[in-house]
Image: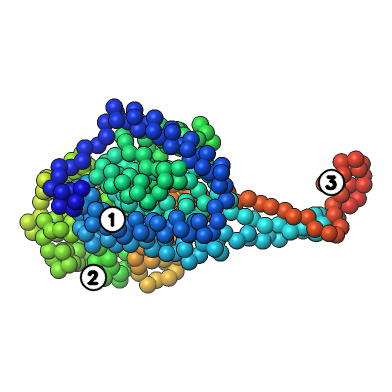
Amino acid sequence: MSLLEMEKAPRVAPPDDAGDAIAISQLHQAFEAQRRAFASDRQPSLAKRRERLQRISSMMESNREKIYAALKLDFGSHPDPLAEALEVKAVTARVDYALANLEEWMQPMPREVDPAYQGVLRAILKSQPKGVVANIAPWNFPFEIGIGPLVDMLAAGNRVMLKPSEFAPASASLMREMVSEAFAPDLVYIAVGGLELARAFSALPFDHLLYTGSSNVGREVMLAAAQNLTPVTLELGGKCPAVLLPGSVTAESVGGILGVKMIKNGQMCVTVDYCFVPRADLDNFARLATEFMAKAAPNYAASSACAGIISERHLDRITRLLAEAGDSHSRILTLEDDGGVDRQTRRMPISLVLDPAPGLRLMQEEIFGPILPVIPYDTVDEVIEHINAGNSPLGVYVFGDDGATISHILGQTVSGGAAINACAIQAGLKSLAFGGVGMSGMGRHHGEAGFREFSNQRGIVVRGQGPQFDGLLSPSQNAENVVAQVPSN
């Protein structure tokens, strides 16, 4: 289908259960084919891995226009520059980084030994492919989180099965087309379908499973994986706070926070979910936010810079959160004079909720949309107490130049990552391990961390010449002789 045809076509319908029955049969066949293929090539060479990674870059670059179009179909509205930066270039940058470092990552890593107990030994840790690994990807970054981990998984020497989200059906369909052209199904397989297929997918006895999405679904995925003792990496999000210290409520910091909030219109797991500002700076924050949007993105919700909300259901949920805040007499500031919800494109403006009541749903749930609660505070300790009263988020963001206070906040809170005088950037660095902790997830990927995550870290000992601890090698010795050989210090 051409770009013009994709743009004019009606939104792709999500798969139905009847289609899932066929897809599940194909899924099991593909899984067995991948297991057989891995058994015939358990340790792919450096050259073979590099060639596979290069295919990912070629695939992304040759399909960029189709990627733009698919994202528009799924979101109703999606800016092309955002698609290029965060869905195409983000993946190819991961490939480039892996290609530059893969030879080093594949080298055995020496480990110290104790000759007093073990004689003359050499110990190494060698990364070994796990086998058939899987990725259940979300709808908000269908290509970056769908294809991006493929870089880590193929670099580690694995076979890969991917289940894109049924809530982004155009992107899922395009991914299947792209991958089918670039890879044989016994190397990389895309399973496209709905809920029943997702359940069948997570129940397969994979050698590792990555899931990105909500904590509620994450529990189900982990429970299904546990039946096969499949190790999991979970990226689950959470309510990421930004803390602005006294003196840091500036045009730069407020603009940085809103700029991140504009990415996918708040539909990003590491976006700022709520802000703390010194009580005296609450109105100043609101003024600076209004000025930033008027200058940087006038008529934002009616422009091509605004991504649509992924579905009518999600749009209804977000508008209900905002309505509930209004009913509680919270002060709501929409950052556009004429901003309103466009149901056709599912675009809506960014709104601040100033000094929200703590019992509101938007203070209890991850918002995942263009609403930003702004909470005034009097002491840093009450900020820390508030953060620690909830689940550990993917990120904590602190703005200011007081190093001691910043260290105190980071030292007294727990999160998957953190950033100082910035937001969300920790998730975009290809060299930095990314992941959650507690309710925001487990495990790490990106770069070397991803290579290690999807590898079996195999410990290997090689005995050389010299004295040895015979108690480990000669069961015929009596206990007195064994004990006599153990050093006293």
Residue on which disc 3 sits: 473
Q: From the image, which quarter does the C terminus lie in?
A: bottom right
Closer to the chain start, of discs 1 and 2, is 1
Closer to the chain start, of discs 1 and 3, is 1
Tag 1 and tag 3, C-beta contact below 8 Å: no
Dot 3 amino acid type: Leu
Residue on which disc 2 sits: 251
Q: Which class describes the residues within 10 Å of circle 1: few (<14), some (14-19), or many (20+)?
A: some
Q: Residue at x 50, y 56 (%)?
A: 48
Dot 1 amino acid type: Asn
Disc nearest the viewer among 3 and 2? 3
Residue on which disc 1 sits: 63
Q: Residue at x 35, y 59 (%)?
A: 58
Above or below: residue 248 compared with residue 214: below
User: In this view of the protein, which residue sits in the foreground, 259 or 73?
Assistant: 73
Spatial distance from mark 1 to mark 3, Cα to Cα? 60 Å
